[in-house]
Image (cartoon, helix red, strand yellow):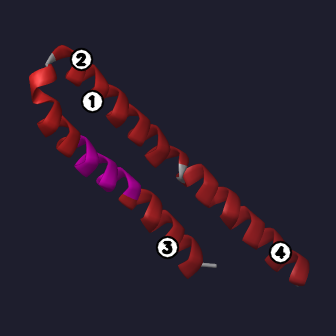
């Protein structure tokens, strides 16, 4: 029985690792598009940076929800 519990724990850890890939890709896209927009319109850099940080916060919230569910269902 302990071997089965150990395998189940390892699978949930791998599952969270796979679930964290999505927010990481999202943060990369958000940052890349913000830099692209700042290059096109430098006068909007301040507003774009604020919007970027809000977008990153929402994307990272998904990762935090994922790790919370990992610990809840463990």
Task: Give the image location of residue 19, x and y in percent.
Answer: 54, 53
User: Reading the chain from its start, which is encountered first: label 3 or label 4?
Assistant: 4
Kindly indicate whether the residue at mark 2 contacts the one at mark 1 (C-beta within 8 angstroms).
no
User: Which residues fall within the magenta stretch?
Assistant: 52-60
Marks 1,4: beta carbons within 8 A: no
Could you say where residue 56 lies in the image, as x and y percent from the top left?
33, 48
Q: Which residue is situated farthest in the bottom direction here? A: 1
Q: Which residue is mark 4?
A: 6
User: Between marks 1 and 3, how big is the CA–CA gap?
Assistant: 29 Å
**Marks 1 and 4: which is nearer the front?**
1
Taking 59 as reference, is 17 left or right?
right
- Tell which tag, 3 or 4, sits nearer the viewer: 3
Q: Nearer the viewer, mark 1 or mark 3?
A: 1
Q: Nearer the viewer, mark 1 or mark 2?
A: 2
Q: Which residue in the structure is indicated by mark 3? A: 68
Rendered image quadrant of residue 71: bottom right
Residue 61, disc:
none
User: Of label 1 and label 3, which has the lower sequence position?
Assistant: 1
Q: Earlier in the sequence, mark 1 or mark 4?
A: 4
How far apart are the alpha carbons under marks 1 and 4? 43 Å
Q: Which mark is residue 39?
A: 2
Where disc 1 sits, the SS reads helix
For mark 1, what is the residue?
Answer: 34
SS at badge 2: helix
- Residue 27 position by quadrant: top left
Graded by Cα atoms within 10 Å as few (under 14), some (14 to 19) or many (20 or more), the crowding at tag 4 reads few
Magenta span dominant secondary structure: helix
Q: Position of residue 28 (x, y in %)?
A: 43, 35
């Amino acid at each position: 029985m302990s071997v089965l519990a150990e395998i189940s724990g390892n699978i949930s850890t791998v599952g969270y690792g796979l679930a964290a890939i999505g927010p990481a890709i999202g943060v990369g896209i958000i940052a890349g598009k913000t830099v692209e927009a700042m290059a096109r319109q430098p006068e909007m850099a301040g507003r774009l940076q604020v919007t970027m940080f809000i977008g990153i916060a929402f994307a990272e919230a998904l990762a935090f929800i994922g790790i919370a569910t990992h610990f809840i269902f463990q």
